[in-house]
């Protein structure tokens, strides 16, 4: 679908409910992201909290995907598959990406966590990804071009010396996880669709310490940096409002 759907108040309220509940859940699980835990256990914990708060895990059954969350460590950029064999250890940089729906409307967010003591490099790449996302979101209002967000993210990330992943993008979101428009994390300002009130967007910078090239593992999902250097990923779902933006996935 090429057309960007505008959501009405009722749809937005459902996405807000999904978003707030997901944000609460990812706050609540922070103390569980510790050395010795498997990403499998974290996934089950999050799925349990989602179900008991009335959210449906949208990733489960999305194509061949079987889990509620994607949990990506260190050089894994996105789509890390929860596994009993992936045990957290001190120093790990953990990105948890989850989509949940409330009354059929989805919200999508990614938060990061540090296990024990992490390297300064980890703290820095995480901070740059977060700042790029926050700056892009702060630009949003009706009338700007979508590519203004892409350009903002690229500029912020590259000026800090990091790379912007080309292979994956942000996206529109609503009843489906992925709707139009595609939102690349790089590009020139002043092109692409004009933002309008009621558009709902999942914005998700994926950035790398070295080359931005990724490599998909034989499992068909896990995306690592080709050079196995660190990657960061953050994501929020937002709605374009009459005079600005509301972040649906923050408390
Ligand atoms: N949250 C991911 C995104 O932003 C979707 C994960 S793919 C899935 O596109 F298969 F896990 F659903
Ligand atoms: Co997304």
Image (cartoon, grey):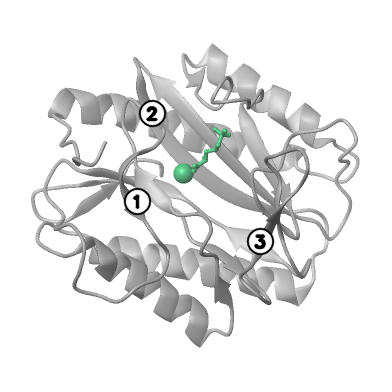
Q: Secondary structure at mark 3?
A: strand
Expressed as whole percent of the image width and height from the top left, the position of residue 156 reads 44, 78
- Crowdedness of circle 1 by 10 Å Cα count: few (<14), some, many (20+)? some
In this rendered view, identify the residue nearer to me: 45 or 152: 152
Left or right relative to 247: residue 38? right
Dot placed on the residue nearer the N-terminal end, 3 or 2? 2
Residue 214 lies in quadrant: bottom right
Question: In the picture, which quadrant includes the C terminus?
Answer: top left
The percent coordinates of residue 1 (x first, y second) are: 26, 36
Q: Secondary structure at mark 1?
A: strand
Q: Which mark is residue 214?
A: 3
Q: Earlier in the sequence, mark 3 or mark 1?
A: 1
Query: Disc 1 marks which residue?
Result: 182
Q: Which residue is mark 2?
A: 106
At horizontal 13% and vertical 29% (from top left) the residue drawn is 8
130 to 201, vertically: above or below: below
Query: Mark 3 and mark 1: span between their CA atoms?
Result: 19 Å
Q: Residue at x 42, y 48 (%)?
A: 236
Give the image location of residue 124, x and y in percent. Answer: 64, 74
**Front-lying residue, 214 or 115:** 214
Residue 218 higher or lower than 126, as above or below = above
| CB contact under 8 Å: marks 3 and 2 | no
How many C-alpha atoms fall within 10 Å of the one at disc 2: few (<14), some, or many (≥20)?
many
Separation of disc 2 and disc 1 at Cα?
Answer: 16 Å
Question: Cβ–Cβ below 8 Å for labels 3 and 1?
Answer: no
């Amino acid at each position: 679908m090429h057309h960007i759907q505008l959501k009405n108040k009722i749809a937005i309220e459902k996405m807000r409910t999904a978003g707030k509940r997901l944000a609460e859940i990812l706050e609540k699980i922070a103390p569980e992201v510790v050395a010795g835990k498997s990403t499998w256990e974290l996934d089950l914990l999050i799925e349990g909290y989602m179900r008991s708060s009335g959210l449906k895990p949208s990733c489960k059954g999305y194509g061949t995907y079987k889990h509620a969350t994607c949990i990506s460590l260190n050089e894994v950029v996105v789509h890390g598959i929860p596994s009993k064999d992936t045990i957290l250890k001190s120093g790990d940089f953990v990105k948890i990406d989850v989509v949940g729906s409330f009354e059929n409307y989805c919200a999508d967010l990614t938060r990061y966590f540090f296990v024990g003591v992490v390297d300064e490099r980890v703290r820095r790449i995480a901070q740059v990804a977060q700042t790029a996302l926050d700056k892009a979101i702060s630009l949003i209002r009706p009338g700007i071009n979508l590519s203004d967000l892409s350009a903002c993210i690229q500029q912020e990330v590259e000026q800090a010396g990091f790379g912007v992943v080309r292979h994956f993008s942000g996206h529109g979101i609503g009843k489906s996880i992925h709707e139009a428009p595609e939102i690349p994390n790089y590009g020139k300002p002043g092109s692409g669709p004009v933002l309008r009130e009621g558009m709902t967007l999942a914005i998700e910078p994926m950035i790398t310490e070295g080359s931005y090239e990724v490599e998909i593992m034989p499992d068909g999902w896990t995306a690592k940096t080709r050079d196995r250097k660190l990657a960061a990923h953050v994501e929020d779902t937002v709605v374009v409002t009459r005079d600005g933006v509301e972040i649906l996935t923050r408390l």
